[in-house]
Amino acid sequence: MIRFEQVTKRYPGGHTALERVDVDIARGEMVVVTGHSGAGKSTLLKLLAVMERPTEGRVCVGGEDVSSLRRAALPYWRRSIGLIMQDQRLLFDRSAFDNVMLPLSISGHAPREASHRVHAAMERVGLAGREKAMPVELSGGEQQRLTIARAIVNRPQILLADEPTAHLDDAYARDIAELFRSFNEAGVTVLLTTHDGGLFSRYASRGLTLAHGQLQ
Amino acid sequence: MNWLRLQVRAAGRAARQMLRQPFNTLLAAVVVGIAAALPATGYMLLGNLQRLAGHVSAAPEVSVFMQPGIPAQALRDAEKAIRARAAQARVELVTRDAALARFRANDALADILDALPDNPFTDAFIVRPRDADAQALEALRSDLAKLPDVEHVQLDSDWARRLDAAIALGRQALFMLAGVLGLGLVAVTFNTIRLQLLTQRDEIEVSRLLGATDAWIRRPFHWFGTLQGLLGGALAGLLTLAAGRMLSQPVAELAGLYSLEFVLRPLSALDWTALLSVCALLGWLGASASVRRHLSRIA
């Protein structure tokens, strides 16, 4: 389903984040990418979300080369994936409900259906009843759950998560890992990066390790 | 999803954004309102002045005053002579009695006329030529002055024509003022939207990551500018209305001194529609230019 073909990414300034990476991920897999800081984990996800373009090689999803998508086609590709960034990117002047509603507003869902989906997504991540809370009123774990709710509310087939358990204590991290497992069991293809491979090793179909931009 | 529904939602998002910053919204609307109120008030006053000018004839008139006490036959001969010299004109005889009756109808003048021992007026002819050319009128005046029994000939329309010219000049000046202030209004909106884009930078970036198209991002900013223009236009209309109310009493008193009944008319429904439409359009233009210039800089 997801295929990285000889992908190299060099940033302006000459830093090589990824070097000739070949990865195949089948539909319904849960793949965990580990590696030290600067190993290229985040770049891998950014290439798949087309936040960056490869310097060489290509990234294909379902046979389509998403790395060469035109700018006008990008939004529609991004609507089909769930994206959880390391820095969460929550809107702190909006309620939890409005944060989760944003992807549905963008994709043009009718308000009633969208509202129903938001409640369902928040319940799914254990935030039922916290719809009116502002992000600042939520704990770190709850904020991460909110980010996950926002990522799954469009019911994506692919979920990308960059360090979803960073800065969380063990109990919260385990809850989050359980959540990803449940999404994967529901048929969602999950690609996540972590510096704590041990936490996800129980749930992952496969583990990949990156070091200095190369797969080990 | 159809176009209209997208627009309605974008307008809703823009309205919510405005309500989140009520003070800023009000301040921007006041700036737009004052900028639009100046030409709007000028337009209202000019319209009323034009209406006032309409009370008096701007068409050329030549008044031919006959010598006092001439016999009726001489008056008939004079009329024939005038009609012969001004074939294309309408000629009206105003007898001295008719003139007296007309002036008596005015309360202020009635007392003065009563104080006089005799009717002070002479018989006169009002000549309204079709040709308004200044040279032709002067030639006619000179020609009529040579007729027997004619005391004095007066060209009456000069001041009215001067007023018309002044109104036309005022209209030109008003258009120029409106143009300059309209540009100012666009600039104000341009800057407001620039600040909005900076304030909402995080939301724009997140929205792009979640699949927002450029059109989806742009739309509420366009509506923001349009709504701000509408709000400013409404404020301008209210300011104009207030100015009209404040001026109506002194204007009525002034008109009374000239024996005129004149009520200052406020902006009509059509004027209101035009004011709101123009302000909304200028707001949209400012927003559109600002979004085009600044959005591409937000990755």
Image (cartoon, grey):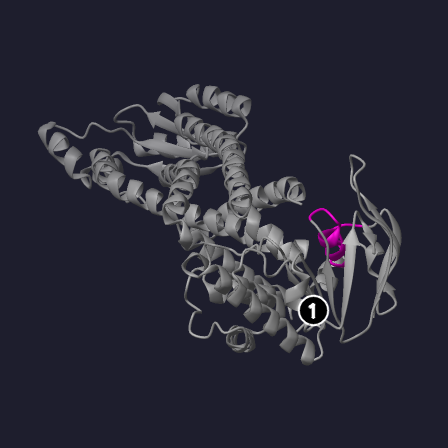
Badge 1: residue crowd in 10 Å (few <14, some 14–19, many ≥20): some
Q: Which residue is situated farthest in the front direction here? A: A198
Res. B81 in view: no
Residue A84, given in percent of the width and then of the height, sits at 63, 61
Q: Quadrant of residue A81?
A: bottom right
Segment tinted magenta in the rendering: A37-53
Is residue B2 found left or right of B126 in the rendered image? right
Compared with B112, A199 (above or below) is below
Residue A30, given in percent of the width and then of the height, sits at 73, 71
Query: Which quarter of the image is occupied by the C terminus of chain B?
Result: top right
User: Which SS class for mark 1?
Assistant: helix
At a point 18% along the width and 38% down the height, the residue shown is B104
Is residue A22 found left or right of B65 in the rendered image? right
Q: Which residue does the numbered mark 1 point to in the structure image? A: A201
Residue B90, given in percent of the width and then of the height, sits at 46, 39
Compared with A213, A4 (above or below) is below
Query: Which quarter of the image is occupied by the N terminus of chain B?
Result: bottom right
Number of callouts:
1
Is residue B180 found left or right of B210 in the rendered image? left
Question: Between residues A106 and B240, which one lies in front from this camera angle?
Answer: A106
Is residue B26 found left or right of A84 in the rendered image? left
Question: Between residues B156 and B226, which one lies in front from this camera angle?
Answer: B226
Res. B173 in view: yes
Residue type for callout 1: Ser
Magenta region includes residue A45 = yes
At a point 54% along the width and 32% down the height, the residue shown is B131
